[in-house]
Amino acid sequence: MKRVRKILSDVLSIRENTITDKTSPSNTETWDSFNALMIVSELEREFKISFTFEEIAEVTCVGDITKALEKRGIKLHDK
Amino acid sequence: MPTLSEYLARSKKIERTKHSKHQKGNNKSLKIALLSSSTIQALKEVLSVKCHDAFIKADVYLSGYNQYVQEILNKKSGIYKFNPDIVFLFIDTISLLGNAYFRPYKDSSMWGKKWVNDKKEEIIALLDTLSKKLSGRIVVHNFEVPTFSPLGIAETREESGFIESIRGLNVALQDFYKNSQQIFVFDYELFCSYIGKDRMRDDKMYYIADYKINPQYIPALSEGYMAYIKPTASIIKKCLVLDLDNTLWGGIIGEDGLAGIKLGPTPEGRPFWEFQNYILSLRDRGIILAINSRNNPRDALEVFQKHPSMILKEEHFASVKINWNDKVDNMRSIANELGIGLSSMVFIDDDPSNREIIKRSLPEVLVVDLPSDPSLYLKAVKEINDFNVLQITREDLKKGEMYLDQKKRKELLSSSSTLEDYFKKLETVVVVQKANIPNIPRIAQLTQKTNQFNLTTKRYTEKEISNMVDKGYLVVSVSVKDKFGDNGIVGVVIVERKNNIWRIDTLLLSCRLIGRGVEKVLLGYVLNLAKKEDADIVVGVYIPTEKNMMTKDFYKQNNFCEKKVKGEIVWEHNLQDKYVYPDFLTVEEK
């Protein structure tokens, strides 16, 4: 989870400790469509995966990201 | 290399501190514009970070998505208001070809020479418009060659193939702009090959946001851009300073001995051997080499003299410091000896602690983080893009020899009884020449690189120099030769002539020639010509910088009178007497 937080914090310019499962575009001003793409690209690099169109479309908050990662067998230990 | 998100985070921090006063004063400001046919978001952010790290205060303008044609054609568009120092134009292959990219053989007569020529003319017309309205540099991408053809393997048998045509366009553009003073072709096709075309494509990013390049490679693309940005900001490294043990050869000469060190065409020796070859190729194109090594000089020099696989020889180095002194002191004395600033030096050492010391004590020096595995040395040194000049001049190619001549001059100096005697023995000839097409690139280069003997430190592009010549400015170069060799063009004076008042805009001399009276020829030529052409006065100013202190009293020493005009100090010469050149110089006017 630390790796996810680091990416979100860097891309969205928000503090790591403020990120929760509920963090989402609607409550984060900097989470625009460009930054959303950057998050996808960075998560794919970090975890060596490739999301599908559908997965990307379904993401509405950080909780959805962790679910999508876990579904791919990525264990986010320190959750 | 930092990750993309780290770049994004840093760019925001830099943006926030942009207007604070705590920034280093010597940062150069540069306006960079990005025009493109597809999405390149993040490029602006990454570039601003890379510029910041290179001591450039960048202002980056990103044109609207796929707005490059409108931006160029509309006289009132944002780019002309922004007036950039450098513009990058990235038209991708899919945008260039449109539907023909997907169905190239819908019209079978389409490809070949005619197509190449039509597309070339289209691009040239666009760039013509842009270059006429801007004085800054223009860097245009060539085109990524597709890795597929609908004809499959028959492609290479076609009269005029699809792939062949795109390659042809790249060659045609490169040929057309080969001698341009303003427009440079960035070999994007080569960049794509280097990254790997398959890796570079991210179809999802393409479909979602029209990224033709996987955003993960935007930092690499930015690095490619930096190779143009740095020389545009006059940040050019001139000298490569090398350690010896475990850098030029494997092992420690003091312990392993001549037979024990690794160097030559063996698995362990080859990385060092090839590394040396590459370094010598840098010298061939004008980079000065120096050694900074803690070693017993006799042991170390024996390697140069006796090891059969040494590619680099003593005579390739303009300055050699092999001793037990502090490496920082050695760096300083190399800079002094060569008459160049620490900020034009690059340092290579395998020992991380030495690198750390230099980084901390001399932050101006670029320190290369050499990987610990010697087989990666060559790659690391090839990635240094700080030696780039936009145009390699005749002077660059001969620089290695020139510094060797300089050594011989020093020997003559120490054997001469007086300075006068030394100057006479040198038999110096100074050739004065007005600006013309062959010498303009060098004139522009000198305005960009010269820091110490430079009265006003105004930087000019080749196009700006040509414009000044057209406007009637006097633009003069001097070249200097003596019994030891030809230094090529080393000095420039630029004078604005208006209503019998001659204003010296630029007067500079390359650091290698300081102290030999050549500056007197630059000034004397102007004064004598002004007198001959009935000018009333010649006016000069001194604009102080951190580096040009030595020229502070130049006008005073040459009988100019100090005047205060609107609170500014100017120097005036009334042209009463003819200016006499030093008698130890022979002056030829061409």
Image: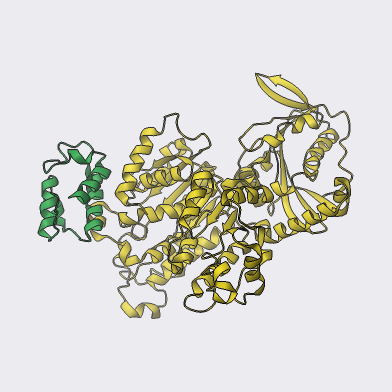
Chain colours: A green, B yellow
The image shows residue B532 at horizontal and vertical percentages of 85, 35
Q: Toward which corner of the image does residue B264 lie, by quadrant?
A: bottom right
Q: Is residue B421 left or right of residue B60?
A: right
Residue A16: tell me if it is visible: yes
Q: Is residue A16 left or right of residue B226?
A: left
Query: Against B50, is B270 above or below?
Result: below
Q: Nearer the viewer, residue B575 or B290?
A: B290
Identify the residue at horizontal 43%, vertical 53% (top origin). Answer: B223
Q: Nearer the viewer, residue B422 or B333?
A: B333
Query: Against B178, is B182 above or below?
Result: above
The image shows residue B378 at horizontal and vertical percentages of 48, 66
Q: Toward which corner of the image does residue B179 lie, by quadrant?
A: bottom right
Q: Is residue B294 left or right of residue B185?
A: right
Q: Nearer the viewer, residue B376 or B204?
A: B376
The image shows residue B142 at horizontal and vertical percentages of 44, 60
Identify the residue at horizontal 57%, vertical 68% (top origin). Answer: B253
Identify the residue at horizontal 49%, vertical 57% (top origin). Answer: B384
User: Disc count in the image?
Assistant: 0
